[in-house]
Every structure is written in C-alpha cells, then in structure tokens.
Image (cartoon, rainbow, N blue to C red):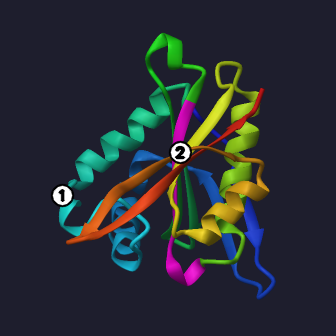
C-alpha cells in the first residue's frame, strides 16, 4: 500500500493546502479535478470527451492504488477541493517491476505555487524508501517547458523523444519526452 503522512503547507499569502494519500471517499472530488484540469490545458493526452468514468469507477481506481504496494496516489487539497493529483504505478511484469510511471496535474489557479514540486518531492522520497522501486519515469509534452524545468530541477533526465507522438488536430502534432530518475 502506497501511503504518506499528511502534510499541511502554508503558502506565502497565508493560504493552506494539504498533501495526503487519496482515499476512496475522495472519488467525487478527484473526478471533478480531472475534468477541470483537462479543460484548462492542452498538455494532457486525454480529452474532455474521453472522461467517461463514474464515481464508482474512480473509487475503484483509488482503491487499486491503495492495494498495490508499488503504487501511490497523492492529492493536494484546499479545504474540500482537490487542486492537484499525482499518480504513480510500478510496472507489474517482473523484469520491469523495478520502475514505474507517474502522472501529475495541478489546477491552473494553483500553478507556480510549489504544489507540483511538493507532490514530486514526496513521491521521490516514498520511492527511495520503497525497496522495490529503483527508477521513476514520466512522459511530458515538449511544449510544456515549465514542467520540463521542474522535472530537470528534481534530477530527471531525458531518455528519449517520441516524435509527433500526440495529435492535437489536423496537421497539429507534439513530441513527448521520456524522462526518468534513478532513486537507487
């Protein structure tokens, strides 16, 4: 089971937010966050039309993370509102189980306040303490320069590029970078 102790963070403007492990009861707020973030950015692969999960399916997805010792699902919340999510899953096949992949999102109104960094740092500490995880990986649009700078500042290195990997529309493509960090 992936779990971290809750942390309360006070921003310079006095606003507090909490970082903690997601629970099944968070499913409605997690789903709402996902829908909002997808509508705010072009840096995610999923489109708003593709979000068809029910609250029960979201609840099951959260429970899968809790049941798997190689998975971690973090939420950042301000009051009862989920403002950020980080999901990490270790590969299930034996020869790949020493690494996993993450996805992270923060609502636009909360960008550039250290929320993404805090979630990433928390994941990396958790991964370092997990005896099974040696490498943390992610994939990011090459056009998402703020995210790339964040990942580089945390020690992630580019391992590859997928050219024209995401099709945004007719004749509109974007490359993605594969980035990883060894934690052992």
**Could you tell me residue 44's position as x and y percent?**
40, 63
Disc number lying in front (1 or 2):
2
Of residues 54 and 148, the one nearer the viewer is 148
Q: Quadrant of the N terminus?
A: top right
Does residue 180 appear to the left or right of 103 in the view shown? right
Q: Which residues are magenta?
A: 100-110
Q: Is residue 15 above or below residue 149?
A: below
Residue drawn at point x = 52 percent, y = 19 percent:
96
Residue at image x 52%, y 12%? 95
Camera-side residue of 93 and 145: 145
Whether the residues at callouts 1 and 2 have beta carbons within 8 Å, the answer is no
Q: Is residue 16 visible?
A: yes
Query: Residue 52 bears which disc, if any?
Result: 1
- Quick check: is 142 in the magenta stretch? no
Residue drawn 52% across the image and 39% down it: 101
Residue 176 sits above or below residue 129 on the image: below
Label 1: few (<14), some or many (≥20) within 10 Å? few
* Separation (CA) of disc 1 from disc 2: 21 Å
Residue 1 shows in this picture = no
Q: Earlier in the sequence, mark 1 or mark 2?
A: 1
| Residue placed furthest toward the top | 94
83 to 51, vertically: above or below: below
Secondary structure of residue under mark 1: loop
Crowding near pointer 2: few (<14 within 10 Å), some, many (20+)?
Answer: some
Dominant secondary structure of the residues highlighted in magenta in the image: strand
> Residue 108 lies in magenta, yes or no?
yes
Q: Which residue has dot 2 on it?
A: 102
Question: Quick one: SS at disc 2?
Answer: strand
- The x and y percentages for residue 5 are 70, 45
Question: 72 or 111, which is in the foreground?
Answer: 111
Q: Residue 86 in the image: x percent, y percent?
A: 54, 52
Image-based side of 168 in relation to 121, left or right = left
């Amino acid at each position: 089971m992936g779990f971290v102790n809750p942390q309360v963070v006070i921003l310079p403007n006095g606003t507090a937010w909490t970082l903690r492990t997601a629970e099944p009861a968070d499913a409605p707020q997690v789903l709402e966050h996902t829908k909002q973030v997808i509508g705010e950015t072009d840096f995610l692969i999923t489109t708003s039309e593709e979000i068809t999960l029910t609250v029960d399916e979201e609840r099951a997805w959260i429970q899968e993370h809790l049941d798997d010792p190689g998975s971690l699902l973090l939420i950042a919340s301000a009051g009862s509102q989920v403002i950020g999510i980080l999901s990490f899953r270790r590969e299930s096949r034996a020869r790949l189980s020493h690494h996993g992949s993450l996805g992270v999102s923060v609502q636009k109104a909360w960008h550039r306040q250290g929320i993404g960094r805090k979630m990433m740092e928390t994941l990396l500490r958790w991964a370092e303490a997990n005896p099974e995880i040696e490498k943390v990986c992610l994939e990011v649009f090459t056009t998402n320069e703020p995210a790339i700078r964040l990942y580089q500042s945390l020690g992630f290195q580019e391992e590859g590029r997928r050219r024209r990997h995401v099709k945004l529309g007719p004749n509109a493509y974007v490359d993605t970078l594969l980035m990883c960090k060894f934690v052992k």
